[in-house]
Amino acid sequence: MNGYFTEITWKIDLVLFSFSLVLSALLLAHITIRNHLRNKQGRKLLSIKRGVFDLLLSGEEITEGLRLPLSKDIAPSLFLDIETNRNRELAFFNKSEQEIFRKIFLHQDRIARLGKIAHLSRNKWSRIEAILSLGYCQSPSLSDVLKKSLWDKDEDICYFSMIALAQTKTIVSAKILLDFLKQRPLYHHKIVSLLGQFPQEISAETARLLKDQ
């Protein structure tokens, strides 16, 4: 009987040891893949920064037709890295560099592609990144595009659409947010906070749009 229990205990220990080895291997693989992707992202950011810096030094006129390194391989996540400096430890872009990058990066074909991702992608966070990218385009013509995603059933999509609309800082986007507020009063504090960041002349005009308290 003692031998039987010893054998069972040994098998359990073997299973637990094997399980711990598998977990360790998976953790190591996860860390390796994460570091590889992060390094790859860092190399892309540095390559784009060098391209923008070279343009600044050259004094060349900045137009849509210019090509930056990896300009065809810029996903919404990379665009947001540059616009928000959320990975500043990898590469930091000052305002002049961001403006140059935005002018080259944003053309009608790419904006249309971002709009398609924002509305049709099955990956929610890909949609959110595309929506935020559209907001950072700061083009008044995109207000109607963002208005559609604002009314999405998913609360996260709705929330980030508000953030994106606030980036355009136009009277049109302010009116869209106010119309949304009238039907979704639960977002009162967030929308008021966003409208407070609009230019003073737009904030004053926005106040006139309010017909009630």
Image (cartoon, grey):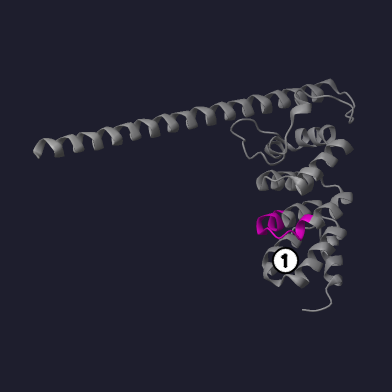
For the residue marked with disc 1, what is the amino acid? Val
Q: Residue at x 20, y 38 (%)?
A: 8
Query: Quick check: 76 left or right of 22?
Result: right
Please name whichever residue, 146 or 25, is drawn nearer the observer in this view of the structure: 25
Extreme-left residue of the structure: 2
Q: Is residue 118 above or below residue 57?
A: below
Quadrant housing residue 11: top left
To which residue does mark 1 refer? 192
Q: Residue at x 70, y 48 (%)?
A: 128
Q: Position of residue 194 (x, y in %)?
A: 73, 60
Query: Quick check: 83 left or right of 22?
Result: right
Q: Main secondary structure of the magenta part?
A: helix
Q: Residues within 10 Å of mark 1 (few under 14, many from 20)?
A: few
Q: Is residue 152 magenta?
A: yes
Q: Is residue 134 above or below residue 63?
A: below
Q: Position of residue 135 (x, y in %)?
A: 78, 48
| Element under disc 1 | helix
Quadrant housing residue 179: bottom right
Please name whichever residue, 134 or 169, is drawn nearer the observer in this view of the structure: 134
Q: Position of residue 104 (x, y in %)?
A: 84, 32
Count of picture labels: 1
Q: Position of residue 63 (x, y in %)?
A: 90, 30
Is residue 5 visible to the viewer in this orientation of the structure? yes
Q: Which residues are magenta?
A: 149-160
Is residue 107 visible to the viewer in this orientation of the structure? no
**Quadrant occupied by the N terminus:** top left
Quadrant housing residue 114: top right
Q: Residue at x 49, y 32 (%)?
A: 30
Q: Residue at x 56, y 26 (%)?
A: 36
Q: Is residue 12 magenta?
A: no
